[in-house]
Image: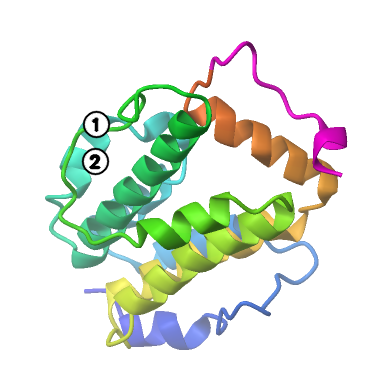
Amino acid sequence: MANYEYIIASLPDVTREWKFADGESQADFIGWIKSQLTSKDIKTVDTLLAGGKEENLTKEFYQEALKDGNRFIREYFAFDLGFRNVKARFVNKVFGRPLSQDTIDINPGEEIDTARIEDTLSLTDILARERGLDSIRWEKISSLTTFSYFDLDAILGVIAKMGIVERWRALDEETGREMFQELIDETRASYGGVSYNPAQNE
């Protein structure tokens, strides 16, 4: 059985201000965490990590995640599904496409603050928009681990937050432009060949 208390006590307190030390990465911490876990728990960690890769986010992935034996996985990916569907519908509305296009037709059973997500997506400052979206995700992770102190859910929360911190470590304006294009690409927008023109936002 994994010693969750030891693992958690050995991990940093990952706040919004926390940063990786030079040469450190999320992968380093994950490698150590996995070395302390059972094979069953490692599979749960791998499910969380798989959900961080766009190419894995299929209907089948969400169907499996929503019935996973781990509460954090079920509730986090119910949120993630709703979150991404809101983003897809927002892009569809902007480009005059059917609202359901490129969404995943599963009811996640999760209440999503659609208005807040759409307000954040409407921001013209690309980096402010991405930080705002990450804040929504960060808050969800925190809510899922409020009463998790020395269990696997607490560890999964740390890993998820480290992923957000790592994403921001090298973020700059150029990356922000790329992230805007990714938002379009992930919903396969095809409105006359959408591209980002910074001059239009100045």
x, y percent for residue 184: 57, 29
Query: Where 186 falls versus 39 (above or below)?
Result: above
Residue found at x 75% / y 72%? 21
Q: Position of residue 30 (x, y in %)?
A: 50, 60
Q: Which residues are magenta?
A: 190-202
Q: Are marks 1 and 2 in contact (CB under 8 Å)?
A: yes
Percent from the top left, x then y, of residue 55?
44, 29
Disc 2 designates what residue?
62
Quadrant for the C terminus in the image: top right
Residue 38 spot, x, y in % from top left: 27, 63
Q: Residue at x 52, y 80 (%)?
A: 11
Name the quarter where the N terminus is drawn. bottom left
Confirm whether residue 39 shows in the render.
no
- Circle 1 is placed at which residue position? 59
Name the one closer to the observer, 8 or 174: 174
For mark 1, does the 10 Å Cα neighbourhood hold few (<14), some (14 to 19), or many (20 or more) residues?
Answer: some
